[in-house]
Amino acid sequence: MIQIGSFLFLAILILLGASIVIFAKNPVHNAIGLVLTLISLAVLYLTMSATFIAMVQILVYAGAVMTLFLFVIMMIGVDKEEERRESIKVQSFLVVGLVFLLFGLLTYVSLVSGFKWDLLFPQAEYAVIGSPESIASLLFTEWVLPFESVSILLIVATAGAISLAYGKNRNLG
Amino acid sequence: MEELLLLALLLLPLGTAVFINLIGKYLKVNQIAQISSLGLAGAFSISLLLFFLLGLNNFESLSFNYFTWIDAMNVSVGLRWDGLTGVMALLITLLSFIIQLFSVSYMEKDERVATYFVYFNFFVFSMLLLVLSSNFLILFIGWELVGLSSYLLISFWYKKDSASSAGKKAFILNRIGDAGFLIGLMIIFNIFDSFDYDFIFSNTNLLNSNQASLIAFFLMIGAFGKSAQLPLFSWLPDAMEGPTPASALIHAATMVTAGVFMLVRVSPILTKAPNVLFLIAIIGTITAFFASFVAMTQFDIKKILAYSTIAQLGYMFLAVGSGAYVAAIFHLLTHAFFKALLFLGAGAVIHAMDHEQDIRNMGGLIKKMPTTAYTMLIGTLALSGIPPLAGFWSKDEILGSAFVAGGFYLPLWLIGLITAVMTAFYMGRYWILIFLGEERTEQASSAEEVPKLMRVPLVSLAFGSIFVGFVNTPLFHGVEKTLKEVLYNIDVIHPPTGLNFILLASISVLAGLVGLFLSNIIFIQKIKDPFKELQDFPLLPKKIRIILGNIFNEERKIFVLINSALLFVKKLSFNALYLDVYGRKVFVDGSKSLSKFVAVSIDQLLIDGLINNLANSSMYIAKKVRTLQSGYLRTYISVFGIMSILLIAFIVLSIGRF
Amino acid sequence: MDMQIPTDWYLTLAAILFFLGSLGIMIRRNVLIMFMCIELMLNAVNLTFVAASRHFGSFDGQVAVLFILVVAASEVVVGLAIIVSIFSKRSSASVDDLSLSKG
């Protein structure tokens, strides 16, 4: 009972945050909505026993990434308002079309399958706790190559960001 | 040995032509003339020698194959020497030698004289190739080459527009005949599987009448194209644009007779096709009549001779059509002599008159150019068929053969007779207007006799015209003996002998004399109004004179009508029955408008339009499609989303296993 | 924490989140907001992975989440650097101004 209740509560929070992201006018409100979504997601991970991931999510996503976002919003977008009217002519049609298509597809799939979504694969019997040790045991043995590549990726990203931000303004020598 | 001699005979003129072509620019006219004369004299001597050898051998034909050309069709390059080729070769070489002497003097001031001699010798080579061939394919090659030489020589002064179009006209009309010839050749090959004369003519029993008629018909078309019969005649009068000696050789004596030669060659086939033979005779006769009719009112000194040539060729075809092959070749022989003589004489007159060609502007030249005048008189009389000159024997043999052939050939005999009257008339008029009377212009007064190099050929040809007729009199039959082997012992129509002969002969002579008489009274005595003259004619009794005079005075209208009718006829004659004009309108202008129509409506509108529209529409579509690239990121994303959903839907629907 | 909640609920939630993110990209013109919607979509995917990991009882899903997290972070870094360099000199942050590639 309590799991269902917590799940529903968290789900509502997530969707609320997402709606704020989409529909808010002020960019800062958007950022706050995103933070709400991220933290609710992290709590949801906790309910799923993925503890490590939850913490990492809060640290990295809700912490670092959102701070970056807020920085840039302050630099660029904070006092700029958008027009409400859509400037591209066909855009509304495309959006409506997409929505309809998606809903149609989903409804069709649900109807055809009779809402039995996970009968293809049986569920595991008991929950696994996603502790750092368990993840590390996988990360450094089976997934070590992607791990290393990702570290290179990070370095490249950093270098790229620096050159992009500084490159025009100053001579780096 | 004869093998080599034949080859030498053929290649000597060719060698001369090539030699002059290569070195001609470095030589003087005299030297070129000497080389050319040597070459042609050599050719004549070789043919004389060969003829002699042949005579010793009782005119048995020889034929040699030099090498195989097309193995699959059994065609080899081979030459043949028999009575027919002997006669033709002698004629060609002798005449070309004589005419070439004349050309030296006539063309010496021309700047392209070396080229002229090259073409001249090349023509002799091609004509010899045609005559000496031993199979149809080589004959055809010679045929085409002769057409080519004719074209080259007609349009020799190519800078003149009329000369080059005349050359083109000659070649094109010739080509039309050649198309018929080719079809005939194809039929021959289809039936016999070979082109060789010996093979074909000894196996003519394989042909039924229909096949023979078909072959004969198409070969006839070829002959008519080359020999300028109706309807392919109009190139010959225009061909007079070329130098006069060339006209003498090609368009009087040799090339145009190739058609007759070819038909006599295939006589074994022709005898199996009596209908076609009759057709040949009819067309020949009608052409002769028509050409003589036209010649009576022409004014150009060479055009009269051109139409005369057409008419005489018509006579030769009448002979072929009546089955009198010997008579045809005989007339070919004699005609060559006196027509060449007349042409060279005309050339002499033109030369003396500073290139004036209208006979209305001449007159009284007999005092200034006696040699020319008297030799041309001999030519005129020979052509009119006055005995004992050459023309009488050959023309009479033709008319006699037509008479003997009987039946449907009798009307043709009659028309031939009337044509003989017309022939004598226009030739008499020709000679009288040029040489007798008073000088009508300044130039005529200042004309003087031509140099010796021109006179000698004239005299020699005059001798020929007198004596060459004696080779085939009813007493000697020289030509017939020569041709016996050639004709493969088919039945030849002979002219009558004895009393019939004398009767027929007298009738033809009478015809000639009547023609000459008429031209005499009209042009010498200048009798304009015959009926008035008749009133004063002393020989008629007085009563008849008065009656005639009354008729004349009272029924004036009739005479006015007759006069205007005569004028109309005169106009028809002068314009060659407007055949040339209509032919040009129908064929030339017709094809021009047809090609214009095709070019504009089909090519421009349809094809160009199709391609252009294709290009335009693709550009239009591209312009419209280009607007899809709006450059807006969000549009791209949305489309991307839609497409990916559609893709997933497709996959889901095709799996359908949920 | 036992397993009373069926996996498909999580998947549904992730799907709705993803859909909302894509909707946001198509609607909004401000480039920063579009970026945040991208983050939403990535998070939806993360949720899917974690749910799958829970369903199958293995940790591969969570390792994948880790990687996605890293990639998302670096992507944000570079993307924002680009946005800064383009849009700092402009007056509006609308992405519709970047339509130079129009044909």
Image (cartoon, coloured by chain):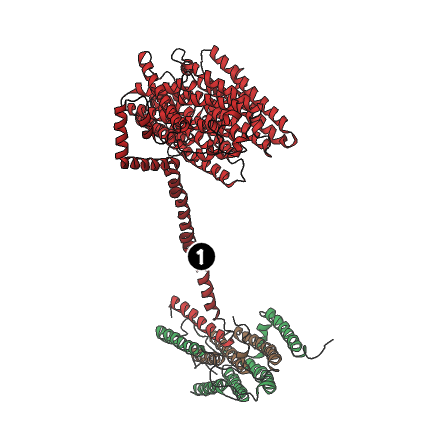
Q: Tell me which residue sits at (50%, 39%) in the image.
A: B164
Q: Amino acid at mark 1?
A: Ile
Residue C78 position, x and y percent, is: 61, 77
Q: Quadrant of the N terminus of chain B?
A: top right
For label 1, the residue is: B611
Inspect this view and state whether residue B423 appears.
Answer: no
User: Residue at point 58% right, 23% down?
Assistant: B452
Please name whichever residue, C46 or B425, is drawn nearer the observer in this view of the structure. B425
Q: Position of residue C29 (x, y in %)?
A: 51, 82
* Chain displayed in red: B
Q: Is residue B536 above or below residue C72?
A: above
Q: Position of residue B148 (x, y in %)?
A: 50, 33
The chain drawn green is chain what? A
The chain letter under disc 1 is B
Chain letter, colour brown in render: C
**Element marked by disc 1:** helix
Q: Quadrant of residue B582?
A: top left
Of the pair B183 and C65, the residue shown nearer to us:
B183
Can see residue B46? yes
